[in-house]
Amino acid sequence: MAPVATQNNNTSPEVSQVQALKAKNAVFNPFYSPSIGDDGDESYKYSQYKPSFPARSWEPLEEIKVQDRGLSADPDKKSLFSAAEKKSLFSAAEKVKHLTPAIGTELVGVDLRQLSDAQKDELLTHPRMLVFRDQENFDIHQQLELARHFGPLHKHATTPVPKEAGLEEVHVVYNDASRRPDPAAFSKIELWHTDVSYEVQPPSTTSLKVLTGPEYGGDTLWSSGYALYSSLSPGFQKYLEGLTALHSAVAQADGARAAGLPVRREPIESAHPVVRVHPATGLKSVYVNPGFTRRIIGVPKAESDAILTFLFHQIGENPDFQVRFHWTPNAVAFWDNRVVTHSATFDFWPSTRHALRATPRGEKPQSVEDYERETGKVAKDRLAEILKAHGLEAQVDKGGASKARGYND
Ligand SMILES: O=C(O)CCC(=O)C(=O)O
Ligand SMILES: [Fe+2]
């Protein structure tokens, strides 16, 4: 038999051809393989903020102390509604539009450049995600400065930074006609995530400003971890409170490398409580997400898979926990990555959609047990608090005949 010409590592030509073919046809999940499209339009108004992927090598993140700003905010939010004083964020707004009961409030007529420290703190204690439109003069430096109010900024290991130098703490979201998402590469469920939850100290009050977006489409969805926790039975809530889950950066780093892009910090994996407590509100929230949570530690794999699948589908599919927001250019959203999961839509090709994110690092996620031991307080369930305010207790299913459905048409 004629000798087979070998390539590196004794790979046969057939094998390397298959590899080359695979590489050529590689499809990328848009979540793990960052925004690499660029239509080359240099006249574009925000071309300095188009994505770039500098090949840097950063040390592992060191642990830092983050004092939660929300702890100094008015706990009763009395000032939020004292319209005469015009002090609080909410009373400073011309209009307060709640988007759904669980999550999402739009504040109209607030200039994000003018916030007092007390008003900044209110961005964080409010249990909803908050949006502000028409912030054209709130530039990326001011966005970073506002994020720093909540903690030192996070630098992402793989996602793009702006072409303009000196903005390595900015995460760029960019898609244009040159790159079409491949629906064969991902399911919608796996796009739901909380940002970089694999970090030892994942982010807190994160902001995203959309510079350019389609007239319709390109919405973002957020799902409340408080609402998910409240929806579960008491026994299951207790069970989840005792569990820890593994969050991993490995798939994201692999996605970047597969796309030929640098990984600026080696990927890590962290264990976090499945239910965490928000340090300022004292409310319990489910803290797992399809994007990064891989398994529940210390339980059989089948059990871990079943529980995570159930929770992931509740996050992605239960509309009562969610808000869906349609952006207008220069709208800015703030969400608390500790208690909210989010997902983008990819329905807008061939339009350009371009956004900039600023991401402060938060505290290490705190379990219910740790929170209660360290603060001497009892962690709370958001829905139970609402019911209590109405003099009610949680509904208990007492069995009996099967129930009529309330929605039958
Ligand atoms: O593009 C979006 O709507 C959200 C992107 C995202 O998940 C992020 O920047 O954290
Ligand atoms: Fe995100």
Image: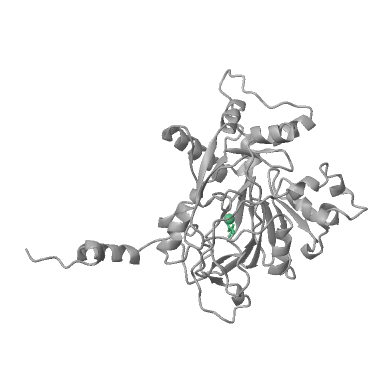
Is residue 229 visible in this depiction of the protein? yes
Q: Residue furthest right?
A: 84
The residue positioned 62% from the left and 23% from the top of the image is: 397
Is residue 381 visible in this depiction of the protein? no
Eyeballing the image, is 22 above or below 402? below
The residue positioned 61% from the left and 50% from the top of the image is: 202
Query: Residue 85: image x %, image y %?
Result: 92, 53
Q: Residue furthest top?
A: 400
Q: Is residue 123 left or right of residue 292?
A: right
Q: Is residue 26 left or right of residue 108?
A: left
Q: Is residue 163 left or right of residue 278?
A: left
Q: Quadrant of the N terminus?
A: bottom left
Ligand 1, what quadrant? bottom right
Q: Residue furthest bottom?
A: 43
Question: Is 85 in front, or is 328?
Answer: 85
Q: Quadrant of the C terminus?
A: top right
Query: Residue 32: image x %, image y %?
Result: 48, 57
Q: Is residue 263 left or right of residue 381?
A: left
Query: Residue 45: image x %, image y %?
Result: 63, 77
